[in-house]
Amino acid sequence: MRPIDEPDPGVVDPRVLGALLARHGWRRHGGANGRYTRWAPPGPEAGSRGTSLLLPESRAFPDCEDLIGEALTALARSGSPSAREVLTGLAAPSDEIRWWRDVPPGPTGAVPWPVEERLRSAARATLLAGALAVRARAGYHGARHRRRAEAALDEVVVDGTPGGGLTAFLPVETGRAVSVRLYHALYAAREAVDYQRATGGMEAFDSAVEAGVSRELTEALVALVRGTEGAGIVLAWSPAAGTPAGCAVRPEPVEFSPGDLPALRAAGARYLADEPSVPVRITGSVVRLRRSGPHGEGTVRLRVLAGADVRHVRVSLDEDAYRTAGHAHLVGLPIRVAGRLESRGGFRRLTDPSGVVPVRVDEAVRERLMKSMRETRETLGGADDFFGEGEEDGEDGEDGDG
């Protein structure tokens, strides 16, 4: 989890602080109307370790900064989950996404560790599905756009919540597009599941792709719901940034049950089967060559430099094209090849290759490629492993191309 920055009382808007307190269960009571309000912590926190907070109504109130500073100090010292969430929301204007699962507690009443890990994994997969949908609408993304989607989540803070839930704080500046896309995608997924369960038809999942639904999202929802009596997700917009256009001010929770799993699984399989291959022209550096003997066709693995938003692809080449790829590698040059990026295997395989040619690059780029080649050989154990013969080393995607 990214560390939480301490909010500056000189810039905290007391109205935003009050909205966050209310969101996380704090109770407003007493105070002078139009001047200041008093807040008590939620539930058990009130009696055990809670602290009453005094907040000015606005920054026009005398000693506003001192009162806010005292409130922030009290929140930081309380150590309660709700106080930590309020401080997280203040550190940077953030939208909040909360997941929960109805899971029977363990023998001692606590949530078993594997259950918590499954919740975190499902939450991460949900966020990644939203970030992928921001990059492109597709029924199946595979390895495409994954690097940039993962980078879009770098600033997200994730924290546990009372009752075994999990909350992600998405900074508005870098994460609002993901929050908005997930808002539309989750409701579309819920509606598509309802339609399938009522009619048996899958057509609603086809139109839901435009809203951001994908195999990645359905798999995340399956992971969230599996092994539970029900699960749900709710979004809350940053009080400082306000509600984005086209979204509800206070979104209702989106809930799923075990009875929804067959529809979600069928949708994921449908998306995988229906997503077409993509015509591309890729420029990449050769990082592996393999063939079954000294002559004939072989398989080349490329680190993609341009032409497709994936890290690596494999392509089977005839003898002449394979020789061209080998020579280009030896002199430190990338190659360019046209073909179709196949959805099978996560868009990591190029089929129907043609036009394999070396690509001229400036000396600095060539030197970097040569250095990368030497490092690859050292990692693999030598040139014999790089220019391999024998069986192909596993199916696409098993080596972490991701």
Image: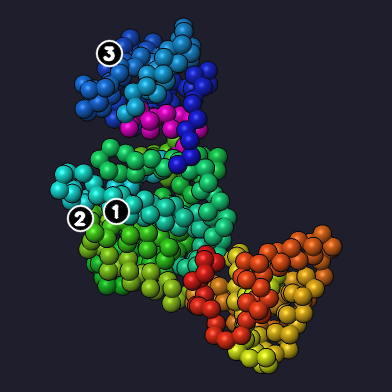
Tag 1 residue: 114
Name the amino acid type tagged 2: Glu
Which residue is identified by label 2? 229
Asked if the magenta segment contains residue 90, the reply would be yes
| Marks 3, 2: nearer the viewer | 2
Real-space CA distance between mark 2 and mark 1, rounded to the nearest whole angstrom? 16 Å
Give the Cα distance between marks 1 and 3. Answer: 44 Å
Is disc 3 placed on a helix, strand or loop? strand
Q: Earlier in the sequence, mark 2 or mark 1?
A: 1
Residue at position x 46%, y 29% in the image: 90
Q: Quadrant of residue 356?
A: bottom right
Magenta range is 81-95
- Crowding near the residue tagged with mark 2, few <14, some 14–19, many ≥20 C-alpha atoms within 10 Å: some
Q: Let me know if residue 321 appears in the view.
A: yes
Q: Residue at x 38, y 30 (%)?
A: 84
Mark toward the viewer: 2 or 1: 1
Taking 33 as reference, is 98 above or below it?
A: below
Q: Where is residue 226 shown, x and y percent of the image?
A: 27, 60
Q: Nearer the viewer, mark 1 or mark 3?
A: 1
Q: Which mark is residue 30?
A: 3
Q: Main secondary structure of the magenta part?
A: helix
Q: Residue at position x 66%, y 67% from top?
A: 378
